[in-house]
Amino acid sequence: MAEKKKIKKEKEPDITFYHPDLLEVPEKGLPYLKGYKCKKCGQLDFPKLSPCPTCWGEKFDVVPLSRKGILYSFSDLYIGQPGLETPYICGYIDLPEDIRIFAMLKGDVDTFKCDEEVELTTGPIRKNADGLEIISYMFQKA
Amino acid sequence: MKLQRDVYIAGVGETVFGKHKMDYDELGRLAAFQAIKSSNIDKPGLIESAYVGNAHNGIVTGQTIFKDIGICGKAPIINVESACSAGAMAVHLAIKDVACGLTELSMGVGAENHTLRRKSGTAFMPAMNDIEAVHGGVMTGKYAMRATRYMHETGATIEDLALITQKNRRHATHNPHASFKGDYSIDEIINSRMIAYPLTLHQCCGVVDGAGAVVVCSEEMIRKLKIEKPVKVRGSVVTSGPYHNKPRDITGDDITEMTSSMLYEESGIGPEEVDILELHDAFTIAELLYYECMQLCRKGEGLQFLRDGQATYGGKCVVSPRGGMLSYGHPIGASGAAQVAANVKQLRGECNGYQVEPIPQVAMSHVTGGGLSGTEHAACTMHMLTSDW
Ligand SMILES: [Zn+2]
């Protein structure tokens, strides 16, 4: 039995950051989302889609996306996903690059409005399999 | 799908929708056997293929349903999954078999038991490999955002949304298959527990169990079975949701607009000719938006259409005559097949206590499926049926 235990592989730790392809958090300066511009047809996408769904191009330029956008719609959720503390708030944010982002909103219920300006921030979106917070992009009132 | 030859519905079945101790397979069998009996089929050999919609109950669900009634070993049974659209897709595939001449008689079934398995107090969500799901996305939230935006743009209120629940549950008052029915006051609806602002508990479909089943066949088989009231399939359309990450108008629904247009074209029947409609009223806001998406009224006039009584008895189109998902609840793999079953019964004048009068001759059904990031819905299935006797 003891021997069997020894060969048992160490469990790899679960992720605590979501996801380096999507979000850059520089040591100095502000975090930003990464858009992917297809080198063949010019389409800009978030998240990264490879190949490009329009032309099947496989080469992309990484483009930092605007940090501010307009809150198109939102909802204060009182019954949520299993394992997530409620209430929490979700919304669609439209960026000037003509891209819509779905994200959690940082702030209080009953305070958001359609068409108000919001800005990128980061925060915990859920707990991982080890019970640690997973950090990702969120938006808050600008 | 252009139907290559005429396809008819011979018989249908549906269980009571509600919290059941019976698992999905028993429910599915009940509905299937009802459909078989009402099709005057008296032995197993006639069924040449069967499709079974289910979302959450595991593997080989169709074979599990059919093995006890002597159909396993005699026909291919294929399991279909596309979240809420699964049951309607199963019916579509049965129609396709007959339309293509592959079979003379086929079945589509939808069956689901949620309550034996699911933890209550949590919301349905897309799969965790979906970027929106990772960020807390749930179906209630998706519809709630549509409602928030609709209210922002049109000035509609929660009280307006509540009218949908009130209407549909009134329609269901005497429907023995529905589980939430009768008179609900607007106050009661809007003051029920908040689920996802602005959607309160009574504006959301209940989590229940149930099954629906449909037997489809060729014209020759309708004669052989001596079906007195054959229902003709005028159109059956399945689509997948357009995908992109650009801003889109969520007070519309691109996939429903596309699918209904295709159905109108395929069937040669326009929106103004549809007498009754079962649609995906999983949440109040959905029904309101879909009036516009399906061109029952012009864009921006959905609320007026509702307020003017155009979606109830005596109106242009009786929407959710069985009570819709807001009254039945929504066992997601089952609902699409149960909608078709309910429409057939309306066309045949068999809905004692909740029959639409005069008896409708054109019935449409609509069910979307699945939250998938970058789409409004992953799938949409619609059917157009007419009485043909
Ligand atoms: Zn491209």
Image (cartoon, coloured by chain):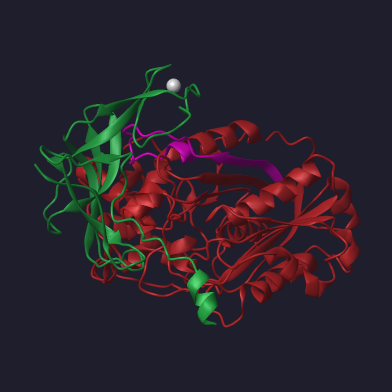
Chain colours: A green, B red
Queried whether the magenta region covers residue B359, the answer comes back as no
**From what the image shows, is residue A37 above or below residue B102?**
above
**In the rendered image, is residue B146 in sight?**
yes
**From what the image shows, is residue B153 above or below residue B53?**
above
Determine whether, in the image, residue B106 is placed left or right of residue A51: right
Q: Position of residue A107 (x, y in %)?
A: 12, 55
Q: Nearer the viewer, residue B126 or B235?
A: B126
**From what the image shows, is residue B124 above or below residue B272?**
below
Residue at image point 53% right, 77% down: A3
Queried whether the magenta region covers residue B252, the answer comes back as yes
| Quadrant (top left/top right/bottom left/bottom right) for the N terminus of chain B | top right
Q: Position of residue B247 (x, y in %)?
A: 31, 33
Q: Nearer the viewer, residue B134 or B26?
A: B134
Q: Which residues are magenta?
A: B233-256
Q: Nearer the viewer, residue B48 or A63?
A: A63
Q: Residue B52's quadrant in the figure?
A: bottom right
Residue at image point 49% right, 21% down: A55
Residue at image point 54% right, 38% down: B259
Q: Residue A38's quadrant in the figure?
A: top left
Judged from the image, the quadrant occupied by ligand 1 is top left
**In the rendered image, is residue B19 in sight?**
no
Q: Residue B138's quadrant in the figure?
A: bottom left
**Residue extending furthest front?**
A3
**Residue extending furthest left?**
A142
Q: Position of residue A120 (x, y in %)?
A: 17, 42
